[in-house]
Image (cartoon, rainbow, N blue to C red):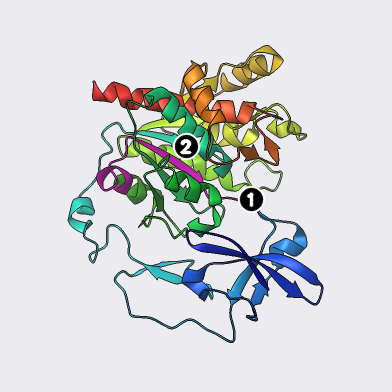
Amino acid sequence: MSLGRQWSGAAEMAVRTPDGDVRALAYPGLVGSPEVGDRVLLNTTALERGLGTGGYALVVALPDRLPDDGARGPGHLVKSRYSPLQTMVLGVDEQESVHHETLREADDLAGLPVVVADLHSALPAIVAGVRGAAGAATPLRVVYVMTDGGALPAAFSRTTSALRETGWLVGTVTVGQAFGGDLEAVTVHSGLLAARAVLDADVVVVAQGPGNLGTGTRWGFSGVAAGEAVNAAGVLGGRPVASLRVSAADPRERHRGISHHSLTAYGRVALVPADVVVPALDGPLGTLVRSQAATLTRHRLVEHRLSEAAQDQLAASPVALSTMGRGLDVDPSPFVAAAAAGEHAGLLALGSRD
């Protein structure tokens, strides 16, 4: 075994197996810190099927050097519940938390802009848009609420780690079965309230972690939860902003223009009106996107052309922009659409300061 890159909460390595070397990922907080020469127990299920994000086998245990049980810490929220790797964390609003009194009766986002996206890959582009709206002289505090439709450990995301380290994000709240954020919460609702009341967010981005489960059917995809997130933001008195999943290059017809994932999540699942940000795109793609967006009649359609400042922020992203294996140079439309939603939310946040 040889060790590779490490980032907050995760360690990459190359592991020799009877079938050849494989890339593997360990979460030291769960299994301990691997060292060269260790035997490792791997889960290769997704790797063998070509599924998942990143092409990793996952380290289940270091059987010859199991981690100590450690001291019993505060908190009783169990994430990844009833799996062999369930982990207990301190919930931001539970009784042992210093924030319990703040959140005990919390019930209002007071107009906080909440950008909802289907894919994790939209996150850096949305934040770029927020930064484009704000400018260097007027920073806005952006918090990421990570749902459990994709990866459960926040540490799997190098994107989140890099955005946190560079100050593009001020924090991450992991909700549902997801874990490992700066704050832990039980639901999207409590995660949103914590983002505002504890992390003092100006803008919140809600999206699943890396990975997206889809079956090629109308309802069988994890992004359905984007509609539920719009409902949560609206019920709590926030300002839901829907980021559209757009592509000009996806070979699948159902994802060309506005993806059917966005049309279903926002058109059928989201019952609370949201600002659906329609990117001002030129040519046939723009015509297609506008016609598809017109079917979302429950919502407020906001056509937005990305500013030069937001475009500069996209180009300056501290992480590579990539979705479904395509970067900004191959298919800019998904990133422009996400950044447009972020810029609109940033302008809303700035307007609330006046």
Residue 21 in which image quadrant = bottom right
Of the residues under marks 2 and 1, which one precedes in the sequence? 2
Q: For numbered disc 2, what is the local secondary structure?
A: strand
Q: Are marks 2 and 1 in contact (CB under 8 Å)?
A: no
Examine the rendered structure and indicate whether residue 214 appears above or below residue 311.
below
11 horizontally vs 50: left or right: left
280 horizontally vs 116: left or right: right
**Residue at the spot 53% in from the left edge and 62% down from the top edge:** 10
**Percent of width and height locating residue 36:** 63, 76
Disc 2 to disc 1, how far (Cα)?
17 Å
**Residue at the spot 67% in from the left edge and 35% down from the top edge:** 327
Residue 318 bears which disc, if any? none
Residue for badge 1:
213
Depth check: 194 or 315 in front? 315
Q: Can residue 201 be seen in the rendering of this structure?
A: yes
Examine the rendered structure and indicate whether residue 210 appears above or below residue 134.
below
Residue at the left extreme of this rendering: 101
User: Can residue 278 be found in the magenta stretch?
Assistant: no
Depth check: 244 or 172 in front? 172
Magenta residues, start to end: 194-213
**Percent of width and height locating residue 204:** 39, 39
Depth check: 6 or 150 in front? 6
**Percent of width and height locating residue 58:** 63, 67
Q: For numbered disc 1, what is the local secondary structure?
A: loop
Name the kind of residue labelled 1 in the image: Leu
Residue for badge 2:
116
Name the kind of residue labelled 2 in the image: Val
